Every structure is written in C-alpha cells, then in structure tokens.
Image (tube, rainbow, N blue to C red):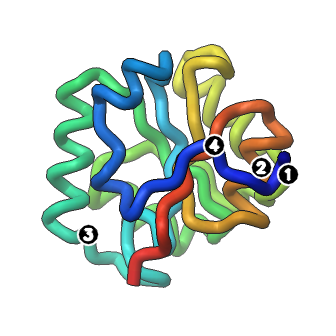
Amino acid sequence: MLLTPEYIFRAIEAITPEFLRQHGITALVLDVDNTLTGDGSQQLDATVQQWLDTMRAAGVRLTIVSNNTAARVRPFADRVGLAWVPLACKPLPVGLAVARRRLGVRKNQMAMVGDQIFTDRLAAGLYGIPCLYTMPRG
C-alpha cells in the first residue's frame, strides 16, 4: 500500500491540530509546490498563513522538504518562517530523515503533507510515516 495515502484532505487548511493530536502527530513535513502554494509561486494565501499560525500555536513542529533547489525554496521558506530541506530527492526518504533529525522527533510522531503520490506519498511510505495527502492547489 505504498501508493495509497492514509488520509486525504481537500486542502492543507483542512488538517487540524485536533486531528494531529488524535493520531499522535506532533510534527509535519510540508511540500511546497501545489501544497502550501501554487506551482512556482512565492505567494502564500492568507488561509494558509492562518493555518501555519494555528499549527504553531498548537505546538506542531513544521518544516519544508522539497525536491526544488535552494534558490526556489529559501525565499519562500524565509517569508513564511519555516526551516527547509531542498533537493530532497523524494521519493527517496533521505530528506525526511534529515527533517526528522532537525525536528527532534521520532518517526511515529511525524507525517508528510503533500499533493503528489509518486513523490510525497511514496517517500512517506518508504520512510514508514503516514502521508496526509492534499488535493493540489492551483
């Protein structure tokens, strides 16, 4: 079942702190393009900013893991105040391992949030963490 997401959401904003608490998730690894923002965009919707603020207020640890270059990810991550791992090589799980160490959590406390089955979902499955699949933004 490596390609079947454990959970499917219409958008990232539908993921709640209550849902995460119920599932023992204290940290989220976030994809950028078509998950947090549109493909290639440096803009963040107000609803996503509110979601980030809500997650932070709830104590959820957040980081970006992207296959994009630092030139793409850094400006966006800096703008929204998130740590980031570029060139993650998803679906290989190496970027998720880096993120887990930086977040200081155990694997059973984290989940991948993304919109792509063959990168985000597969990376999560190979690493042994759940995927909170979101419908692509855009």
Residue 57 quadrant: top left
Q: Give the mark nearest the N terminus, 1 or 2.
A: 1
Residue 123 is marked as 2
In space, the residues marked 4 and 1 are separated at their CA atoms by: 19 Å
Q: Is residue 125 above or below residue 117?
A: above
Task: Assess disc 3: are there few (<14), some (14-19) or many (≥20) residues with their C-alpha within 10 Å of its C-alpha.
Answer: some
User: Residue 92, percent across and down?
Assistant: 85, 51
Residue at 59% in and 51% down: 65
Q: Is residue 135 above or below residue 88?
A: below
- Mark 1 or 2: the one toward you: 2
Marks 1 & 2, CB-CB < 8 Å contact? yes
- Horizontal side of 34 relative to 14 (left or right) equals right
The type of residue carrying mark 2 is Ala
User: Residue 38, percent across and down?
Assistant: 40, 80
Which residue in the protein does label 1 denote? 92
User: 95 and 48: which one is in front?
Assistant: 48
User: Residue 21, percent across and down?
Assistant: 38, 19
In space, the residues marked 1 and 2 are separated at their CA atoms by: 6 Å
- Horizontal side of 7 relative to 26 (left or right) equals right
Which residue in the protein does label 3 denote? 44
The type of residue carrying mark 1 is Leu
Residue 130 is marked as none
Q: Give the mark nearest the N terminus, 1 or 3.
A: 3
Marks 2 & 4, CB-CB < 8 Å contact? no
User: 91 and 94: which one is in front?
Assistant: 91
In space, the residues marked 2 and 4 are separated at their CA atoms by: 13 Å
Residue at 41% in and 76% down: 137
In space, the residues marked 2 and 3 are separated at their CA atoms by: 25 Å
Which residue in the protein does label 4 denote? 6
Marks 4 & 3, CB-CB < 8 Å contact? no
